Image: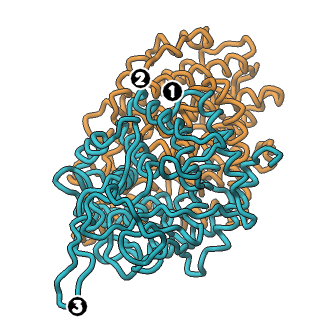
Chain colours: A cyan, B orange
Amino acid sequence: MAGRADPEAMLASGRDFLISAQRRSGAWPDFLTAAGDSTDWTTAWVARTLHRVPGSGEAVARAVRRLADRQRADGGWGYNGTVPADADSTAWCVLALLGQPEVRPSVFCRAARLLGRHQQPDGGFATYAVPVLARDDGSSTPDKGWRTTHLCVTATVVRALLASGNAEAADVPAAIGLIRRQRGEAGLWTGYWWQGCQYPTRQASLALCAARALSEADAERTATGTAALQSGAGGWSAEPGGSPVALATALAAATSLDLTASPALQAAVTERALSWLRTAQLADGSWPASPCLRVPRPGRHRPERLTRWHQDSLGFDSLVSDSRRLFTTAAVCEYLATVLAR
Amino acid sequence: MISSWPRDLLFDELWLKSRRVLREALESRRMWPGDEDYRRGRRRQELRGQSLRNQLLQPALGPADYGTLLSPRVFGHGGDVFRSSLPIAFAFGHEVTTALHQAREGSPGAVERCAAAGALFNVFCSLFDHLHDSGRAGAAALKALVTPGLLAELAQNPSGAGFDEIADAEARVVMKLLAAFYAEAVEAARGGDLSRLVGAVGRAYDAELNSLAADGPADPESALERGIGPFLVMSGCAALGSSHPAAADADRLAVDLGTAFTILDDIVDLVSDLRQGASNSLIAEFAAVGEPAEIAGALLDSGALAVAVGKVCDHLGRAADGLGRTGRLPSGATASDSLLVFVRDWCG
């Protein structure tokens, strides 16, 4: 396709899509699973990404009011209202509510105490601290897989605790140590809930940056490791050999842009990523969804060993798309806002 | 007694009361811009700040360090807040220096360069404070780098500073900003004397170090002095290139503005400063009371908040009166209108 990418125009239409998709309640529901759509987690994700996007103030304010109202008695938020509060949703809600003038300080203190209760002996954070799936007879499904350390959750929790000034609610240095230990050969990370390395790498590197625990050399290694996976057309796939998808592209391009000190690498990666994202943008301003969220059987500890996932099924061991395209579109908008801020 | 409440409730009450008392007082003194005026004014300042950031920061830092400053690789978890508020930090320094320049009846041809120097100094201060408040080891390295000798030397030769060689990225960026401030000041002075400005920078830096050296929270006077220092430097910037400095009036105006914004900042940040043990003139008054929750209770039980808000209004009122006698700013608003947009912005 002819013409150069215009990130400002792409961002404006992406933002308008997100604003038009917001429910009157302020929610941005997405990722349909057996538990229903996610409401609080996805709303927090979209609101957080729109913080930096001009023209989104009112939509963010609606989401913030909703999230602040929905904090539970235990201090947390959940995937939606039907499942227990979890550390990941709570951390994203904290990040979404930070800096919002109407949110009182105790919201963050209570959330931090809940996050602290999710820390495991190895320093990482589990998604759930309590049994998730109770049976009618009062027993519960084996769910230890959901209640052990998850790198992708640990990273977001560290970010939330540090940014909200509540690091004392948990052993943050131990969590940082775990994130550093779990870094792979190419400077990339993998996670429990996510297909591919882009989401875990983005969150882990941001957590280490927030803690000032990522050396310049390590940052460069992650940036070049990420850039090396960029396809010739400029996109990234979730898995090696797969087709490029918008979510992986936005996350990987943002990681590369943020972590390299080389203006030449930044320019080369960004130009191709923008070009790919321009061709991928849909007429309504959104970007296509992709199967990215793993929902392993709750007892499963090593989802990466599972070779066959059920795509978009409502059962376990399924790989779920953000079928409303909100999660992906928000991620791309955040990346575009980052590019424009430079 | 409120002070017997649970800690979370105490902090919420302090947070809410400080905002309510501030807003009511400012509204009653007609110093609270209406919603539409605020939105328009805020947008104008943001655009001005973005333009200043693009125009001043990239040449000051070079492309690699410009990218570094705007990336999450530096300045830790507070860096995001700093980066998103950069345009407003630039706009604030620019607007204050412009207003002080007009108060001095400085030459219209010199105002832009003076204001650019003021804007760079304000951003330098924000970054310097952030680095120190983070308690990072790099802060100690920075403290060792910035000496009175260096401050005087930079005024003579800002371009030969050689800060590119500093290995620590955060310290390097901060020092390059300082050099850029001096380079802009030298240009604005057009060969004139910089000694008054160098003196103001030295005094501001001493106040900063005194406040940081305090074992525990600084005393209220030191905390206030630390806040006023940068405004006196901006007043020094406003005088650059002027043949009739008329310093006393403009410096009084700078002290009023500095006092108002320092106390305002302390009121708005009461809870976060209490929790993080940061320097704050109001907390310093009650430092002997004990733990943060006890200080919060004592603050609520006393009339200290109302007194502090009264001081903000008095100093702002005096500054607005002083600025009201001067003409319109390049932004089209009066100086006092523009500064009140920042006041509301500070309040969150």
Q: At which x and y percent is residue B336?
A: 70, 50
Q: Secondary structure at mark 1?
A: helix
Determine which residue is flagged by label 1.
Answer: B174
Label pair 1/2, CB-CB below 8 angstroms: yes
Give the spatial CA distance, label 2 vs label 3: 63 Å
Mark 2 lies on residue:
B142
Check disc 1 and give the amino acid type. Answer: Val
Q: Sequence-wise, which precedes: disc 1 or disc 2?
A: 2
Check disc 2 and give the amino acid type.
Answer: Leu
Nearer to us of marks 3 and 1 is 3
Q: Is residue B301 among the parts visible in the rendering?
A: no
User: Element type at marker 3?
Assistant: loop
Real-space Cα separation, disc 1 to disc 2, in angstroms: 8 Å
* Residue B69 to residue B38: above or below: above
- Return the mark for residue A136: 3
Say if B325 sits above or below B38 in the image: above
As shown in the figure, which amino acid type bears the numbered disc 3? Asp
Query: What residue sits 27% from the left and 79% below the top?
Result: A133
Mark 1 Cα-neighbour bin, 10 Å: few <14, some 14–19, many ≥20:
many
Chain identity of mark 3 = A
Task: Look at the numbered disc 2 and give the secondary structure of its residue.
Answer: helix
Task: Give the percent coordinates (x, y) of residue A48.
Answer: 52, 60
Q: Is residue A100 toward the left or the right of residue A173 in the image?
A: right
